[in-house]
């Protein structure tokens, strides 16, 4: 989509020539793409490993990289072992996991709905989860796990409501997106209203919840999150094949043998599941699902849905943001959701600005 | 783009006179509705005032007579008249800006908020409170306006030239500014208190005094928007077609951008980020009069104020002892409208 001239040129070059050349061109294109994907994934993996190690090392007491890595695998003395295994490793893993879930969910939303703006932030699913949590905190005085449950409920309720209202002899992307945006504003307005009505201190703590944090996900929570994510990812792998054709439009996808409605429904269910699960544990970590796929698509620039790359970029983005937020880089200890936008958005803007120039040339 | 083939009957052309009449009727009906809601906005509230008294007060005020001691007259002239004027101005500005944004980006979910304008205004207000100690809504109006304009400038300078990209850049700038707002809010409780009441969106309070300063922007923006309507029609066919038809697409974008900043920046400064009106009203207008932007613009400029005033009046009378802010009510009205439009048989591509 972004790279249509580059995609088209080898094909049209082969068009007038003998079929052998066409095969060659396609094969060449495929190799380039595969190499590029390998590079992006490898780069993200290396960066994740480096930053993850950094996350294990840094804190109130700095631990040497070797010791920290050994402690992560269960070797070392008592103090370091406790700090790494109980405090830092869960946080690093949670950041990676939550980021990957949001990144993947965002890519699924955007490719299935064929709108680069379609993400839980803009479709109201994050706003529904926030409204659930904020009303739980402010109106019903909930605390702890009950807030997570009410957030999960809020997000899921909004997603289902969008669903039923947008359904009309099949699920059209534009309807889904419009209804979703309507819900986003509705939830946002009520949340702002609740915040304006509430006692100042309670309002401030509710505001904090709405930005998302991975600081307190450890032990059993992390296990549940990982297990849920694994199940959903298995599901995604089953439908991933349909994402490329769906990006070409309903009619083309149908012509390519994709059952459009079934594919879209399954994909959206999985994406909503990923978002709702991650949100209930971490809060609506802002904009990862919007920014990560956009970055991934531009870095790959193969016009595809970039599911794998989005997952990796989402994880990297969130881990980076958590490290920055946790270590006073902006002068405050900020929860991860505040920093994700600050980390991802400038990079995406730079990509958008430079891609633009390339295309004009 | 999703117009189903069955939706357009073959006899479309022969029914054109019907259609023109229908459009005129819709517009006239909306103007009448605007008159009625303006009257309701002057008459209803904590103290209900008889329409005849409202009329007396208005004619007296228009004739330049000094205010009588009558309490009702004072309420109408000093409180409700400015409030209604702000509602009409802001509603029209929001709806026009929304129409322009959707036309320029060709993205049906685009609205001024999505182009980063609300985030820019919010950040400016929060910073004005923290850095310059501004504490009253009247003081931060120019900050809000400047913030919205700066954000829009950033968005248009990066995203210009590619409509799809423009919306994405807008969302990204919002993603960049929102965390800055949140960080400041977490650190400063004065800013948080100022912000959370502004962010709901309301017509009440001293903001009406600012209309006296800001109205030229709305008029200029509205004139520009009207001038752009025909260009939007061509732009809807795609950049290439519009260029082939002799339009300078770049100029259209720049002029529309200027109009959007003027309209949306003013409205946001006046009443806060009441975003849904800019999104829902153009869709409703499209549903009422079809895809011709000249008609959409004409309908939006009347429908916007109607929605905002109705929201404000409902907010005034809904709760027995307090007010619901217009922003909340507007969202409660606008969202179902938007959903109903989205559920319609053919959602027109923008």
Image (cartoon, grey):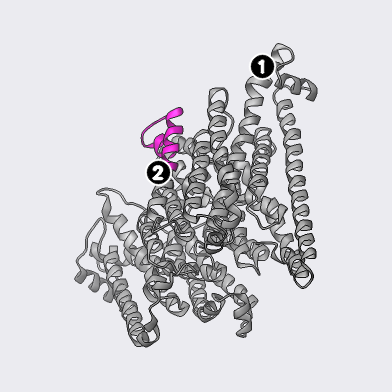
**Label 1: chain letter:** A
**Residue for point 71% across, 60% down:** A353
**Label 2: chain letter:** A
Residue density around tag 2, few if under 14, some if 14–19, many if 20 or more, within 10 Å: some
User: Residue A217, position in %: x, y?
Assistant: 56, 28
A139 falls in the magenta region = yes
Mark 1: which secondary structure? helix
Furthest toward the front, the residue is: A19
Q: Which mark is residue A215?
A: none
User: Residue B273, position in %: x, y?
Assistant: 47, 57
User: Residue B183, position in %: x, y?
Assistant: 59, 42
Q: Which residue is mark 1?
A: A82
Q: Which residue is mark 2?
A: A157
A81 falls in the magenta region = no
Q: Is residue A280 above or below residue B212?
A: above
Q: Which residues are magenta?
A: A134-158
CA separation in Å, label 1 and label 2: 40 Å
| Quarter-of-image position of residue A227 | top right
**Residue for point 79% across, 25% down:** A65
Q: Of residues A40 and A67, which is closer to you in this image?
A: A40
Residue density around tag 1, few if under 14, some if 14–19, many if 20 or more, within 10 Å: some
- Image marks 1 and 2: residues in contact by CB distance under 8 Å: no
Mark 2: which secondary structure? helix
């Amino acid at each position: 989509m972004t790279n249509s001239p580059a995609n088209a040129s080898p094909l049209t070059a082969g068009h007038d020539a003998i079929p052998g050349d066409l095969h060659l061109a396609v094969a060449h294109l495929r190799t380039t793409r595969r190499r590029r994907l390998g590079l992006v994934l490898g780069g993200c993996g290396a960066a994740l490993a480096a930053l993850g190690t950094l996350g294990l090392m840094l804190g109130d007491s700095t631990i040497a990289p070797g010791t920290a890595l050994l402690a992560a695998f269960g070797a070392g003395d008592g103090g370091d072992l406790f700090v790494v295994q109980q405090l830092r490793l869960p946080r690093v893993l949670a950041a990676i996991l939550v980021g990957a879930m949001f990144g993947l969910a965002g890519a699924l939303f955007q490719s299935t709905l064929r709108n680069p703006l379609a993400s839980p932030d803009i479709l109201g699913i994050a706003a529904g989860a926030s409204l659930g949590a904020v009303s739980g905190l402010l109106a019903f005085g909930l605390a702890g796990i009950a807030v997570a449950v009410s957030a999960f409920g809020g997000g899921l309720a909004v997603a289902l409501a969008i669903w039923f209202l947008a359904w009309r002899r099949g699920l059209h992307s534009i309807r889904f997106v419009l209804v979703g945006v309507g819900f986003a504003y509705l939830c946002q307005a009520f949340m702002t209203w609740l915040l304006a009505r509430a006692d100042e201190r309670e309002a401030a703590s509710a505001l904090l919840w709405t930005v998302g944090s991975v600081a307190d996900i450890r032990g059993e929570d992390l296990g549940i999150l990982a297990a849920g994510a694994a199940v959903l990812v298995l599901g995604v792998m089953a439908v991933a094949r349909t994402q490329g054709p769906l990006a070409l439009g309903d009619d083309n996808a149908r012509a390519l043998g994709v059952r459009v409605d079934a594919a879209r429904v399954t994909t959206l269910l999985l994406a909503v599941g990923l978002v709702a699960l991650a949100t209930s544990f971490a809060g609506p970590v802002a904009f990862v699902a919007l920014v990560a796929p956009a970055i991934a698509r531009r870095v790959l620039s193969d016009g595809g849905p970039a599911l794998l790359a989005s997952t990796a970029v989402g994880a990297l983005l969130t881990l980076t943001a958590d490290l920055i937020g946790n270590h006073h880089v902006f002068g405050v200890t900020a929860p991860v959701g505040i920093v994700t936008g600050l980390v991802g958005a400038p990079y995406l803007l730079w990509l958008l600005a430079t891609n633009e120039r390339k295309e004009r040339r | 783009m999703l117009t189903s083939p069955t939706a357009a009957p073959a006899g479309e052309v022969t029914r054109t006179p019907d259609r023109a009449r229908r459009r005129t009727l819709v517009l006239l009906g909306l103007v009448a509705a605007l008159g009625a809601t303006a009257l309701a906005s002057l008459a209803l509230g904590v103290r209900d005032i008889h329409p005849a008294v409202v009329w007396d007060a208005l004619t007296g005020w228009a004739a330049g007579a000094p205010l009588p001691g009558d309490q009702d007259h004072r309420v109408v002239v000093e409180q409700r008249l400015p409030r209604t004027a702000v509602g009409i101005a802001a509603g029209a500005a929001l709806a026009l800006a929304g129409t322009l944004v959707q036309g320029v980006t060709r993205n049906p979910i685009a609205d001024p908020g999505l182009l980063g304008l609300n985030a820019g205004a919010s950040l400016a207000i929060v910073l004005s409170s923290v850095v310059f100690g501004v504490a009253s809504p009247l003081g931060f109006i120019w900050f809000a306006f400047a913030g919205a304009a700066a954000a829009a400038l950033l968005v248009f300078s990066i995203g210009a030239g590619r409509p799809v990209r423009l919306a994405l850049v807008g969302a990204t700038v919002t993603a960049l500014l929102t965390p800055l707002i949140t960080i400041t809010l977490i650190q400063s409780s004065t800013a948080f208190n100022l912000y959370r009441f502004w962010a709901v969106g309301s017509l009440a309070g001293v903001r009406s005094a600012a209309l006296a300063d800001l109205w030229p922007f709305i008029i200029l923006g509205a004139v520009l928007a009207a001038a752009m309507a025909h260009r939007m029609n061509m732009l809807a066919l795609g950049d290439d077609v519009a260029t082939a038809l002799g339009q300078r697409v770049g100029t259209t974008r720049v002029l529309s951008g200027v109009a959007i900043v003027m309209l949306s920046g003013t409205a946001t400064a006046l009443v806060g980020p009441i975003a849904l009106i800019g999104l829902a009203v153009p869709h409703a207008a499209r549903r009422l009069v079809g895809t011709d932007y000249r008609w959409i613009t004409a309908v939006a400029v009347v429908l916007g104020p109607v929605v905002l005033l109705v929201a404000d009046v409902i907010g005034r009378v809904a709760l027995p002892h307090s007010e619901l802010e217009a922003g909340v009510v507007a969202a409660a009205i606008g969202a179902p409208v938007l959903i109903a439009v989205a559920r319609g048989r053919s959602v027109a591509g923008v």
